[in-house]
Image (cartoon, rainbow, N blue to C red):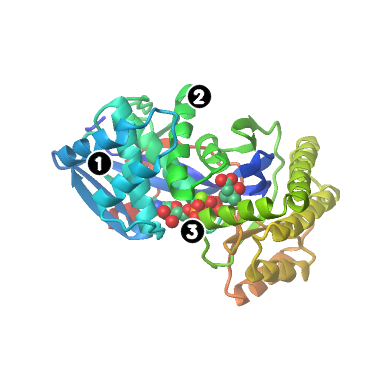
C-alpha cells in the first residue's frame, strides 16, 4: 500500500428534519451531500507523523516515540467503547500546547486528530510514518457536517493504516468502498472523533458520512430510506459562524429548565420526521408539483419549532422571509444559530424565480447553490483519479 498515494473522502450532509431532537433520541432524516472532505495519505519521513489541515490553519508534525509515550496515558483508563475522558483530553492538550477550554476550530481539529491517532493505535497497533493532508469542499462550522466528514475520513484512514480494516483498492482501480462490517467500525470511531469536537453528538452526521445516501437515524439505529425521490434543494450559507457544541448545550439547558413546554416540541419534531419519511417513501422517483405542499408545510412547522428550541438566528429568519417572498419554503439545517438553511425547489418553480431568489439571498451577503443529495459514503480513491481541483487543493497544503 505504501508504494502509492491514497485518498479517503467522505460527504457532508443535510438534515431534512430532526436536528437537535435526534440528540435526545428522536428520529432524524438526513441525506449525504455532493460536497466532500478529502484526506490524502503519503508515506512520511521515518519516525514522524505529520498533518496539514488547511481549512483550519493547522500544520503540525510529531515524532512517533513521543506519541507512543503519550499513548500509554491515553490507553490507560479507556476501554474501546468509552467516550474520550476529560483526563485523556487534558493530557493531549498539554502535549499539543492547546490551552484548557480552547474551542477554536484549529484546537478542536488538532485534539480530535491526536485523540483518534492515539486511541486507534492503542487498540490496533502503531500508525506508520505518514503525511496526512485534509482538505474540504464543505464550509467549516456551517451546519453541513464538516466535523463528521473530517472524523469519518480520519477514522477510515487511521484504521486502514493500523491494519484494522482492509485496503480495498485493487491495482488499477480508481475507487473502492469497505464492507458493511468495516463501515460499522469506521462509523464507531468517527463517532468518538465527533465526541471530541461536539461534546454530545447524536451520531447522525457520522452515520451519513460513513454510509452516504439517505437515512433515518434514531438512537444509534441507522435505516436507509427505502426510496428517495429526486428533490431539488437550494442550500444557503448565511455565513454567520456558530458552534454545534454550544448550540446543543443550549437546547439541553432549555429542556431542563422547561421540560413540560419543550418535550412536546421534541415529540412534534419526531412526528414530522416520521411523517416526512412516509411521504418521501410513497413519492414517485420524479415527483410532480402536487407532492410538494406537504413537504413545504413540514419545513415551515419545523422551522418554527427550531426557533422555539432557541437555535434560530436573525440571518435564518431573513433567509426564510426572502425565499417566502418568492413562494419558496425554507428551514435551517444542522445545528442552526446561523450556518446554512435549505429551500425546497418544486419542479414547477420557474428558472427565473430561482434566479431571483438566489439574487436576493446573495444581496443579503449569503452564498447559495443548488445541490444534489444522496451522495456515496466514505470512499477510498487512488490519488490519480481525483479531480484536478481536488489534487490542486491538496498539493497547495
Ligand atoms: N476541513 C477540516 N479540517 C479540519 N477540521 C475540520 C474541518 N472541517 C471541520 N473541522 C472541525 O470541525 C469543527 C466544526 O464542527 P461543527 O460541528 O461546529 O460544525 P459542522 O460540523 O460544520 O456543522 P453541523 O455539526 O451543524 O453539521 C471545526 O471547528 C473543526 O474543528
Ligand atoms: C444539532 C445536531 O442534531 C445536528 C448537527 O448536524 C447535533 C447532533 O445530532 O449531534
Ligand atoms: Mg458537526
Horizontal relation, residue 103 to residue 368: left or right: left
| Residue drawn at point x = 32 percent, y = 58 percent | 99
Horizontal relation, residue 111 to residue 24: left or right: left
Per the image, the residue denoted by label 3 is 139
> 354 or 22: which is nearer to us?
22
Q: In the structure shown, which secondary structural element does the residue marked by tag 1 occupy? A: strand
Ligand 1 lies under 8 Å from the Cβ of mark 3: yes
* 196 versus 297 height, above or below: above
The reply to whether callout 2 and callout 1 are in contact (CB within 8 Å) is no
The image quadrant that residue 234 belongs to is: bottom right
Q: Which of marks 3 and 1 is nearer the N terminus?
A: 1
| Residue drawn at point x = 40 percent, y = 60 percent | 104
Horizontal relation, residue 340 to residue 81: left or right: right
Q: Which of marks 2 and 3 is nearer the N terminus?
A: 3
Using the numbered discs, state the Cα–Cα distance from disc 3 to disc 1 in whole angstroms.
25 Å
Per the image, the residue denoted by label 2 is 180
Amino acid at each position: 500500500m505504501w508504494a502509492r498515494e491514497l485518498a479517503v473522502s467522505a460527504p457532508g450532509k443535510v438534515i431534512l428534519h430532526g436536528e437537535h431532537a435526534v440528540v435526545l433520541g428522536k428520529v432524524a432524516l438526513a441525506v449525504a451531500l455532493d460536497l466532500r472532505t478529502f484526506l490524502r495519505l503519503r508515506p512520511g519521513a521515518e519516525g514522524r507523523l505529520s498533518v496539514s489541515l488547511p481549512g483550519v490553519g493547522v500544520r503540525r508534525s510529531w515524532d512517533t516515540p513521543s506519541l507512543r509515550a503519550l499513548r500509554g496515558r491515553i490507553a490507560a483508563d479507556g476501554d474501546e467503547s468509552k467516550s474520550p475522558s476529560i483526563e485523556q483530553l487534558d493530557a493531549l492538550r498539554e502535549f499539543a500546547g492547546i490551552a484548557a477550554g480552547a474551542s477554536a476550530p484549529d484546537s478542536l481539529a488538532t485534539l480530535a486528530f491526536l485523540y483518534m491517532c492515539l486511541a486507534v493505535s492503542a487498540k490496533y497497533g502503531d500508525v506508520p510514518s505518514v503525511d496526512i493532508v485534509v482538505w474540504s469542499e464543505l464550509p467549516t462550522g456551517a451546519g453541513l457536517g464538516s466535523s463528521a466528514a473530517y472524523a469519518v475520513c480520519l477514522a477510515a484512514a487511521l484504521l486502514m493504516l493500523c491494519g484494522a480494516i482492509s485496503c480495498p483498492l485493487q491495482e488499477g482501480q480508481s475507487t473502492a468502498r469497505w464492507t458493511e462490517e468495516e463501515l460499522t467500525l469506521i462509523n464507531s470511531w468517527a463517532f468518538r472523533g465527533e465526541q471530541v469536537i461536539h461534546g454530545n453528538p447524536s451520531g447522525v452526521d457520522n452515520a451519513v458520512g460513513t454510509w452516504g445516501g439517505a437515512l433515518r437515524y434514531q438512537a444509534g439505529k441507522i435505516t436507509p430510506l427505502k426510496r428517495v425521490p429526486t428533490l431539488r434543494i437550494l442550500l444557503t450559507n448565511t455565513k454567520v459562524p456558530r458552534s454545534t457544541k454550544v448550540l446543543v448545550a443550549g437546547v439541553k439547558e432549555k429542556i431542563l429548565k422547561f421540560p413540560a413546554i419543550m418535550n412536546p416540541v421534541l415529540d412534534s419534531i419526531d412526528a414530522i420526521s416520521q411523517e416526512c419519511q412516509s411521504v418521501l417513501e410513497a413519492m414517485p422517483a420524479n415527483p410532480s408539483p402536487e407532492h410538494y405542499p406537504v413537504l413545504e408545510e413540514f419545513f415551515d412547522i419545523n422551522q418554527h419549532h427550531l426557533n422555539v428550541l432557541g437555535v434560530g438566528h436573525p440571518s435564518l429568519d431573513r433567509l426564510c422571509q426572502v425565499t417566502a417572498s418568492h413562494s419558496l419554503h425554507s428551514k435551517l439545517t444542522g445545528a442552526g444559530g446561523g450556518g446554512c438553511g435549505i429551500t425546497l425547489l418544486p419542479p414547477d418553480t420557474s428558472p427565473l424565480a430561482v434566479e431571483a431568489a438566489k439574487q436576493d439571498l446573495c444581496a443579503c451577503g449569503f452564498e447559495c447553490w443548488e445541490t444534489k443529495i444522496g451522495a456515496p459514503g466514505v470512499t477510498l480513491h487512488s490519488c490519480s483519479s481525483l479531480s484536478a481541483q481536488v489534487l490542486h487543493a491538496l498539493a497547495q497544503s
